[in-house]
Image: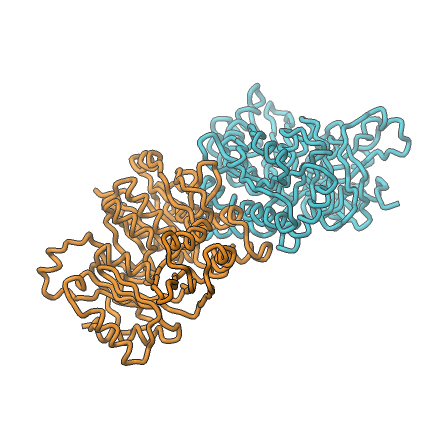
Chain colours: A cyan, B orange
């Protein structure tokens, strides 16, 4: 008997029929003697419907009140899911984030989980219930409803699996696993049977929209066994997210150097030009941005010849105007010559644990792009990733030629 | 400066534009220096949408899970309403029933309010906030979400007004007050400037769908000044629900004997025939029905000639099948000859504080119906009401002829 947390996304609960399907799957697992916690998202389209409704009233919705509204999406789904399980003769009980004490900080619309009170769930599981929990939402210490931001239901699933010390956290989605890249851009993309946490982290954060980055961090931190599966396939094995075992990797001659290619066009580039090159300047620029709870991704600093430096970073496109506003306020204080934003960019990354033991990967990537006449605007590297920022219009082309150059096609 | 609770029903919050209208009205009251608590229903149609969604999964939805789902309707509205107030520059804050501790019993889908913790609201009001509370919902002592049943938002409004000792509770609706009867049935129906609590209680419970009966009981019990107004009229004065002052009534020569005519076709008649006439029989019949939380309205018992008695009562149409099932189980035990149900009935009542001091009202009512050939199946009277059950198909006719016979037309 195992304790399994199953998370179902918006398309998996997108209609009453799909919810009934979900219930049948849960019943099969329950019949094998497992204890099941189900985490569900809002029905597909519902979150956007609610956000648009809010915007009809308030073009920039108040974050606290938006969370109150948006949290209803999952609340509807937990009721429906519990009823679907009851219709199959199972005992089921639903909980909102507030009811099951998923306590978060108070950063409305992008809150972080601080603690989960798992006692109530464990009591119900031991009494034979399937416990259905609303993903994506929590409650702050003052009882205000919070949400975890887009994709936050994955994080709820993994956090519950960690709190309950579950044997496996299964993420059901509309894809059947993690691919070398998005098959909509490269039809030859191939499903990976397993992938390391680190690779997954890079792929998810770079735009392979399979799992939300925070959920992967959580899973890595709490050693949660995580599996991505299709909710439309009966017996798929999906992609297992593994802890890295470098020796295994090295001993496996067939281990590819590159596991996959990630990309996204959700980011915007912000350039702070001609800043005096002195200690503390990075903090003076990024401090106010972080205080406004704007997430920063790539950060690059180039020393100029004249004692000044150019400072470039990327934020989510939605945050660009806000970030520029903040920087314009501190421009005089930090002595910057110019502040500029560009949201017509895309980021393309090659990811692979294998690249550590190989030289020449970066140069192969740059050469491949150069051969297509694609100019590279920013470069950022980590042990298992090389990311470049390019003009948005070349994104698909870049992904396709890199996929081919690194021989990631279906065998 | 007064403290006013304003309750807005489903049509008053039925679209973003209507919510903006509502906000402008609140702003006008706020500008006069009043403290305002706003209670809102779900947007019109939303509760039915959610119930139908639930039924697609579970034809008889689990009450606990249905409450979880249905409570989201008001939760969306409180977020939207708070934002609309903020857009006008007001400070506003929303609360669900759970957040503001509207504690109820655990009778899911028809819970009753036990207590309200008004401290949080008072603190916000004193800090200058308009407080927006979700109507219709509460939370039981174990943290389960409950709902108060259809029209429960009125009850929330009155209960909050009582807890906060508000100066007035204003119920905004799509009608501009209480009429002598439903103008859709009798075009000559006239709006009443004021009506006593007792009359209102009878009219609301009998089917004048202006206010929910429980809210009127609450208002009477806690001496809440209650006013029914149109949310589509700028300066209507609506109908004030007054405490009865018998002396005033008697001194007013123009006080009509009958205030209004109520009717409904939501009830079904259940006949328990040929029961041995012995002590305790009424409890043996109605006890199991009450245990199943089925509300009973009229109850009539007629002694037969043969030492048996016929016992007839009415329940909501939706509860008829359930009530019959319960009675069939106890039929042998109570020794009833036959149990029969009829949902093709209507109840028509004449209501008026004035009828106490006049004789002959009942006979005038019965004669009027007899002249139209309408057979009376049940009669039930109280100090200020005479109600009859008739064949459903004669309902409109009965209301029209009674309205005319008692001279209730527009002057």
Q: Nearer the viewer, residue A268 or B359?
A: B359
At a point 64% along the width and 30% down the height, the residue shown is A164
Quadrant into which the C terminus of chain A falls: top right
Q: Is residue A398 left or right of residue B44?
A: right
In the image, B117 versus A42, the foreground residue is B117
State the residue in front, A309 or B106: B106
Point out residue A181 in the picture as x, y percentages from the top left corner.
Answer: 76, 43
Residue A76 higher or lower than A156, as above or below: below
- Say which quadrant the N terminus of chain A sits in: top right
Location of residue A388 by image quarter: top right
- Location of residue B234 with respect to B188 vertically, above or below: above
Note whether B26 is above or below A303 in the view shown: below
| Rendered location of residue A16, percent (x, y) | 62, 55
Which residue in the rendered view is the most extreme toward the top?
Answer: A279
Residue situated furthest right in the rendering: A253
Q: Report the side of A243 relative to A293 (left or right).
A: right
Q: Position of residue B14 (x, y in %)?
A: 42, 58
User: Residue A366 in the image: x percent, y percent?
Assistant: 78, 37
Q: Is residue B275 left or right of residue A315?
A: left
On the question of residue B275 being in view, the answer is yes
Residue A267 appears anywhere in the view: no
Residue found 30% across the figure and 63% down from its top? B380
Taking the spot 65% from the left edge, 52% from the top edge, the residue there is A20
């Amino acid at each position: 008997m195992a304790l399994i947390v199953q998370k179902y996304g918006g398309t998996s609960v997108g209609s009453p029929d799909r919810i009934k399907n979900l219930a049948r799957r849960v019943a099969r697992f329950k019949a094998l003697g497992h204890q099941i916690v189900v985490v569900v998202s809002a029905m597909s389209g519902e979150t956007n419907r609610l956000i648009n409704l809010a915007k009809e009233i308030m073009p920039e919705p108040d974050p606290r009140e938006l969370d109150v509204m948006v949290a209803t999406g999952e609340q509807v789904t937990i009721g429906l899911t519990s009823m679907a399980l009851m219709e199959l003769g199972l005992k089921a009980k639903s909980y909102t984030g507030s009811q099951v004490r998923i306590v978060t900080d108070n950063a409305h619309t992008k809150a972080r989980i601080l603690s989960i009170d798992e006692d109530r769930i464990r009591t119900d599981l031991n009494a034979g219930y399937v416990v259905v929990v609303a993903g994506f939402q929590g409650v702050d210490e003052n009882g205000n409803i919070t949400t975890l931001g887009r994709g936050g239901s994955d994080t709820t699933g993994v956090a519950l699996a960690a709190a309950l010390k579950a044997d496996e956290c299964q993420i059901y989605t509309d894809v059947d696993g993690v691919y070398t890249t998005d098959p909509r851009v490269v039809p030859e993309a191939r499903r990976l049977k397993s992938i390391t946490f680190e690779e997954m982290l890079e792929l998810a954060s770079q735009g392979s929209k399979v799992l939300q980055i925070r959920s992967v961090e959580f899973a890595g931190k709490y050693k949660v066994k995580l599996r991505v599966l299709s909710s439309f396939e009966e017996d798929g094995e999906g992609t297992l997210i593994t802890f890295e075992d470098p020796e295994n990797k090295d001993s496996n001659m067939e281990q590819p150097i590159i596991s996959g290619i990630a990309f996204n066009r959700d980011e915007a580039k912000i350039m702070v030009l001609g800043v005096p090159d002195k200690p503390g300047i990075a903090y003076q620029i990024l401090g106010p941005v972080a205080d406004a709870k704007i997430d920063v991704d790539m950060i690059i600093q180039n020393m100029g010849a004249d004692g000044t430096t150019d400072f470039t970073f990327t934020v989510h496109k939605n945050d660009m105007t806000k970030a520029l506003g903040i920087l314009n306020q501190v421009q005089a204080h930090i002595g910057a010559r110019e502040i500029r934003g560009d949201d017509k960019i895309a980021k393309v990354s090659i990811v692979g644990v294998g690249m550590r033991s190989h030289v020449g990967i970066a140069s192969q990537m740059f050469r491949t792009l150069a051969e297509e006449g694609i100019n590279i605007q920013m470069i950022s590297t980590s042990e298992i990733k090389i990311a470049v920022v390019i003009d948005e219009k070349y994104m698909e082309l870049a992904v396709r030629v890199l996929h081919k150059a690194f021989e990631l096609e279906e065998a």
